[in-house]
Image (cartoon, helix red, strand yellow):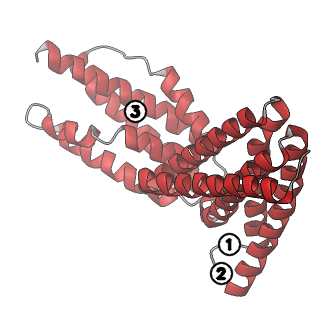
Amino acid sequence: MNDKTRNYLISLQKNEITEYHIYSRLAKSIRSSADAAVLKRIADEEYRHYEIWKTHTKIDVAPDRIKIWFYYLMSIVLGFTFGMKLMERGEAGAQLNYQKLCDQFPEAGKIAQEEKEHEEELLSLLDEERLRYTGSIVLGLNDALVELTGVLAGLTLALQNTSLIALSGLITGIAASLSMASSEYLAMKNRNSEDGHPLKGAAYTGAAYVTTVFFLIAPFFLFENYFVCLLFSLITAVLIIAVFNYYVSVAQGITFKDRFYEMVGLSLGVAGLSFFIGYLVRIFLGVDI
C-alpha cells in the first residue's frame, strides 16, 4: 500500500469515527425511541467501519470535533432532517470512492453497500413537523416579503420620516400577519387536509410573517436616513430569501436557484413599483411631513 492510498484510508477512517460520534449524540437527543435505536445501530456500524480501516492503517485516528459539533448543532437548531440531509450532501462522493477501493480492499464493497443502506434508513426517519408545514411557512414568509418591502418602499418616499415609516410598517405588518394566519386556518380547515392541523398551520404562517416583519422594519429603528434604512431593509429581504430557500433546498432536496430568483424578483419588483407609487402620491396629493 503506497502513501497516497494509506492517507486516503486514514481520511475514511477519520470520517467513520466522526459520523459514529454524530449519530451517537443524535441518538441520545431524539425523542422517538425507535428512531434512536436506528441511529444507535447506524453509529455502531460506522464504528465497525472505522475498525476495519484501522486494521490497514495500524493507527488510531481522532474524530473531527468541529464537524461533530457543527452537524449536531445544525440538527438540534434547524431540525434533524436538515442536519442529516446536509451531512449526506457533504458525503455524496463517499460511496463512489469506496467502490474504487474494491480491487485492493474487498471489504470496501460491503462498506459502500452499508453506507447506502444508512442513507436510505436515515431518509425513512425524516418526518419533522416543521417540514409538514413548509407550505404555511412559505405563505407567511413570501407574503410578508412581497407586501412589507412594497409598503416600506412606498412609505419611504411618501413620508420621508423613519419613525413614521417604522410605526406604519409595524402596524401594517402585525395586522397583515393576523389576517394571513386567519386565512391559512380557514383554508386548511376547508381542505380537510391530512397534512396538518389548521391551528398549527395558522401559527406557522403568522409566526413566519411577523418574524419577517420585524427583520424588515429593524433598519428604520437603527438609522436616521430613510433611504439607507430602505436599502438595508431590501438587503435583509434578500438574505432572508437566501437563508430560507437554502434550508428548504437541503431539507427537501429541491433546486435552490430558481426559487431564490423568483422570490427576489417578486419582492424587489413590488418594492420598486411601490416606491414609484409613493413618489406619485407625494407629488399629486402634496403630502409634506
- Identity, as a three-letter code, of the amino acid under mark 2: Ser
State the CA–CA distance, disc 1 to disc 3: 38 Å
Q: Label 3 belongs to which residue?
A: 47
Q: In this rendering, which labeled residue sits more in front, label 2 or label 3?
A: 2
- Left or right of 111, for residue 199: right
Q: Element type at marker 1?
A: loop
| Residue drawn at point x = 62 percent, y = 39 percent | 235
| Residue drawn at point x = 68 percent, y = 35 percent | 232
Q: Label 2 belongs to which residue?
A: 193
Q: Residue 165, how many percent across, how many down?
A: 85, 46
Along the viewing direction, whichever of 235 and 269 lies nearer the viewer: 269
- Identity, as a three-letter code, of the amino acid under mark 3: Tyr
Q: Label 1 belongs to which residue?
A: 196
Q: Residue 231, how many percent across, how many down?
A: 67, 37
- Left or right of 19, for residue 219: right
Q: Categorize mark 1 by other alpha carbons within 10 Å: few (<14), some (14-19), many (20+).
A: some
Please tell me which of labels 1 and 3 falls first in the chain: 3
| Residue drawn at point x = 81 percent, y = 73 percent | 182
